[in-house]
Amino acid sequence: MKTIVFTGGGSAGHVTPNIALIHKLEQQGWEIKYIGSATGIEKDIIEREGVPFYPISSGKLRRYFDIKNFKDPFKVVKGVYESYRLLRRLKPAIVFSKGGFVSVPVVLGSRMNRVPVIIHESDITPGLANKISIPFATKVCVTFPESLQHVQKDKAVLTGLPIREHILSGKASRGYQICDFHSQKPVILVMGGSLGSQVINQAVRDNLGRLLTQFQIVHLCGKGNIASELAHTRGYKQFEYLNEELPDVLAMTELVVSRAGATSIYEFLVLEKPMLLIPLSLQASRGDQILNAKSFQKAGYADVLQEEDLTAETLAARVEALHANRETYKATMQSRNDNDAVASIVKLIETYCLSS
């Protein structure tokens, strides 16, 4: 039995693709371990899967001035030392990194132990953590064809993004029951990322009257963002976050309004859900979601509304237009010819381990 160590964290998008690979590799007899941050979202997600989790020290790598920038390098150095010792003890055949700041110490610790590393980059351009890690990687899997120009040719492999099998197993009937909805009016799923989005939340709530005349709305609004005064509004169901229930809610969903994180939008693509994407602005990000959204818009999978143009009125108008053109979006999604990312990455892992 060979051992593989996974790493990645900081957001759900850096963890859930790992889950898809973990399930497949477990079926093939691999022993799975996970290294992540003690305080990150990855700890809860991975422990729910029953996978042994090993916490390390982790510091954030910021592109802007912050007093923590003087302290966090020491946390990263500590994390490298902890990773080095952990990997010597776990003796993995290979390490798979999904990115996020916690992955940098693990990748460096792997290099020090001469353990091969495969990295996956979800977005079109690599994030800062992956930019640091890529020189130490054996192979770099990418999601978008546009990403190939950002990674050296001998390392880059176009695989697509690993999708969790259970996201495909939802039942619309259970979704209606969970939300106390009915099947006579279409359902919109609104989500603003794993932490929620105040601007999207407000735009939805400011125009509920207009939207609810045509749609039922499931609103994933983020931790602490439930509007108690709207708790009993018919046709409007709020959740901070959905986990096990998400496949059933998606099964009954006709349209999606979402941020443009790569993991989420690829899951919507596989499920053939027309999307209105509202990417994080340049003021709040490095612009990766803007590029993701433009790629999906160009492919005909989604419409895009920039955050700067988001109001209650523009949101409602674009949702109505998306619904009117939903069959065109669905037909385009059905005609795509994507890789099976899980199979491609698992084959890459196994092939490299056999040859090393």
Image (cartoon, rainbow, N blue to C red):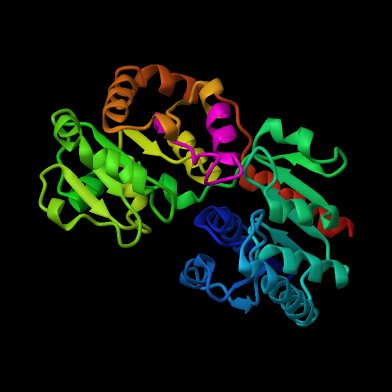
Quadrant housing residue 206: top left
Report the span colored magenta: 272-295
Which residue is painted at 80% across and 80% down in the image?
A: 88
Is 297 positioned to the left or the right of 190 in the image?
A: right
In the rendered image, residue 165 lying in the magenta stretch gets the answer no
Q: How many marks?
A: 0
Which residue is painted at 65% across and 37% down in the image?
A: 124
Quadrant housing residue 185: top left
Residue 142 seen by the camera: yes
x, y percent for residue 244: 36, 58
x, y percent for residue 353: 82, 59
Which residue is painted at 61% across and 77% down in the image?
A: 55
Q: Tell me the quadrant of the picture where the C terminus can be found.
A: bottom right
Which residue is painted at 49% across and 50% down in the image?
A: 165
In the rendered image, residue 278 lying in the magenta stretch gets the answer yes
Q: Is residue 339 above or below residue 223?
A: above
In terms of depth relative to the viewer, which is nearer, 186 or 67?
67
